[in-house]
Amino acid sequence: MTATTREPRTDRGRRTRDSLITAARTVFERQGFAATRMGDIAAEAGVSHGTVYTYFDTKEDVLEATMQQLVDQLLESIDGADLTDPVERIANANERYLTSFADNAPLLRVVEEVSVTDVRFSAILDELRRTHLKRVTAQIRRQQRKGRVHPDLDPQTTAAALCAMVEGFSRHWTAFSSPDDPNGQATLTLLWQRSLGLTPDPSG
Amino acid sequence: MTATTREPRTDRGRRTRDSLITAARTVFERQGFAATRMGDIAAEAGVSHGTVYTYFDTKEDVLEATMQQLVDQLLESIDGADLTDPVERIANANERYLTSFADNAPLLRVVEEVSVTDVRFSAILDELRRTHLKRVTAQIRRQQRKGRVHPDLDPQTTAAALCAMVEGFSRHWTAFSSPDDPNGQATLTLLWQRSLGLTPDPSG
Amino acid sequence: MTATTREPRTDRGRRTRDSLITAARTVFERQGFAATRMGDIAAEAGVSHGTVYTYFDTKEDVLEATMQQLVDQLLESIDGADLTDPVERIANANERYLTSFADNAPLLRVVEEVSVTDVRFSAILDELRRTHLKRVTAQIRRQQRKGRVHPDLDPQTTAAALCAMVEGFSRHWTAFSSPDDPNGQATLTLLWQRSLGLTPDPSG
Amino acid sequence: MTATTREPRTDRGRRTRDSLITAARTVFERQGFAATRMGDIAAEAGVSHGTVYTYFDTKEDVLEATMQQLVDQLLESIDGADLTDPVERIANANERYLTSFADNAPLLRVVEEVSVTDVRFSAILDELRRTHLKRVTAQIRRQQRKGRVHPDLDPQTTAAALCAMVEGFSRHWTAFSSPDDPNGQATLTLLWQRSLGLTPDPSG
DNA sequence: CATGAATGAGTCTTCATTCAT
DNA sequence: TATGAATGAAGACTCATTCAT
């Protein structure tokens, strides 16, 4: 147990800890990591300065705890349901990804901020990317074998590029999408599909 | 005092200032912004602590100066030569973009780090993105009018997605590209072209 | 943050803050404002360096807090009991003024020191002077109307001069008074009375 | 020779030194001593930063040099012409004092500022006060012996009080004098005269 | 558990002063 | 002499973290 966090033993404790995490997220998203003082988090949660240390050892630990559920949720949103039709699968995967990541873009930007200095957090982002990459690469390979994706595409680089597109779009470019396709889902799916050259399932 | 930087008046001064900027870049890339102390920059440049303040008022100013030339170079790499053939143009643009941005990815990550807290730097990234977006959007519109790009694509969202792909790839995903296409240029161009549905120039 | 001072919330806090103010006064009077380091105040109070900042944001704030009670006391000592007999009233007023101001001359000199640079403190001195001037001017006018003070004296300039005499004497000249009239009260009252030409109350 | 100042050897040198002193006075009066940086003085004089050190060793030395002529002039203005008629003499002395001191009040306030920390300057003010005191005390004694000043006044305390009045008025209270007696000279003389009880010269 | 006071290491920043040219 | 770059001691201030109550 590399316990970076002390678990509460009472109900009151759990409630306090939860409100601290909620508060931390609010403050981190508002001010970024560096500019957030432990006192800000305490104030936002309506508890005293020292209480934060009842549950967390360091500021990094607070951020990590704040990320905890999110990371699981994000990993899940990447590792989605296996639909048979690849186009539907893409549409579905993109929808899940965009929903989860765009909603959490502010916090993810904070993780990006800290990740420059702290491996602990670059590891988190790395894992997310690696998971995404693996899944997409595998999928492309499979469809190439079935002859439904351009064979001249390098599966891994292609996957990396497409992952970059979805991640980058969800993090920085959402603001630039058009009102006709406010969250970009339809467009991303189209681009993805056509870039791979995905043809309809002949067996379908 | 609006001047965030005092210009040197002698050659010796210019040399010192330049070496400070070089040193700053090294240190920023190695340690990130938050973890860099002014003293680190001075030490790396081989000057005394206070000398940094001869030319810069704050650590942010040092980073800004470090970015100065880079930003110009990056804007230029976006705003490239106008080739007639759209496919060639894409290939060329991507090559220039990837070269410039991937080379400078570490420093750009530092800017990303600070941009969470300091508008001054989020503005820089914003301008880069906006410039890129404008150019790509215009290009897509033009080709749509000529009937050479799928008309069902929303030009702006599409542009945002493709820009996200190239930017994200250059910043975070380069490490994941395959040895067959080490810098991903060929792949990115293929994806870009096919996703738009770009057909060969009928007039050609 | 308009609050220049964080109020303590416990008794322990109040005690610490108080001892800081006491310590500050000692150190300021000994070294002057410029030569006093925050650390000196902390050391004198027997607390750590950072503790000063628990209650005060800046060195100026410490001085301001140090002045707080004093200013009230000084204003009160100016705005004294209304005796009927003007001569007695003068004697009484001078006694109160000299006692309060001469006792606090060292601290007042420190305020004078800072006031050259910081309006906040020139305002304090200004208020003290203005209050004194107002009171004395009014008193002179009243007695002139009763024909008991030379009518050829300009009330305001006269008041300013007499105030200057008492203030200056209390601040800088006390050291020069003679052993026969160690605190100068008797002499000041005589001078004051005769300069105005105050005659005994005919109604008395 | 405790040479705190290097004398210029050329004409150009003398001119530079003079302009530095003039500049210093301007800046000191505007910003006070503590808030004045050597660079401010250089800038005001239109010379380079380092040039100040060609003529002065420390910032204190600059202030001292700035005071040099002034001190002589002030001492002279105290030690004025010996008129026979004491009332005229008082009027004359006050006029000279007020003119000199009120004109130079801003610089004197700066000396007061530094004198809290630096004996060198408290000595200057002390000398001025002592000189003034001596002269006035002697004069009072003389007139008491002639029976023309109230014998119940302690000469030294009285002198201290009257000196305090003139000094204080010239330094802080000028702003409060009335438009009818803008520089307060007439009023001060009246007060002075009457407080002493000075009667016309019987021998006159 | 919660509180808020206390701690002190860590940095930034200033600026008088020195020095090479 | 004049310049302006370089130095580095000095001090203010921050804030994560600890601790007594």
Image (tube, coloured by chain):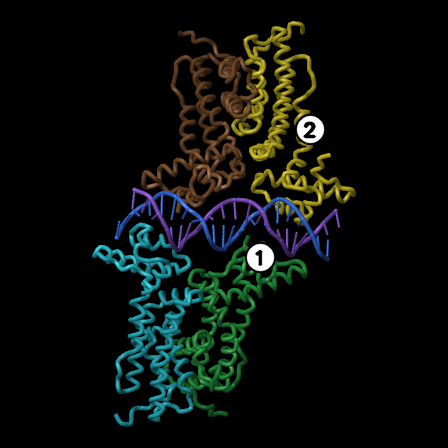
Chain colours: A yellow, B brown, C green, D cyan, E purple, F blue
Where in the figure is residue D106, as x and y percent of width and height? 36, 65
Name which quarter of the figure residue C21 lies in: bottom right
Q: What residue sits right under mark 2 in the picture?
A: A72
Q: Nearer the viewer, residue C15 or B191?
A: C15
User: Taking the image as drawn, is residue C133 in sight?
Assistant: no
Nearer to us in this view, B153 or D52: D52
D90 lies left or right of B197: left
Q: Position of residue B172 (x, y in %)?
A: 55, 25
Q: Residue at x 49, y 92 (%)?
A: C203
* For residue C156, above or below residue B23: below
Crowding near the residue tagged with mark 1, few <14, some 14–19, many ≥20 C-alpha atoms within 10 Å: many
> The disc labelled 2 sits on which kind of residue?
Asp
Q: Secondary structure at mark 1?
A: helix
Above or below: residue D94 compared with residue D18:
below
Residue C151: x %, y % from top left: 37, 84
Instruction: Identify the residue shown where x is 46% and y is 80%.
Output: C139
Which residue is painted at 43% across and 13% down in the image?
B88
- Exactly how many numbered labels are in the figure? 2
Quarter of image, res B49: top left
Q: Quadrant of residue D123?
A: bottom left
Indicate the secondary structure of the residue bearing disc 2. helix
Q: Which labelled disc corresponds to residue C52? A: 1
Residue depicted at 50% across the width and 18% down the height? B183
Location of the C terminus of chain B by quadrant is top left
B20 left or right of D14 in image: right
Q: Chain of mark 2?
A: A
Name the residue type under label 1: Val
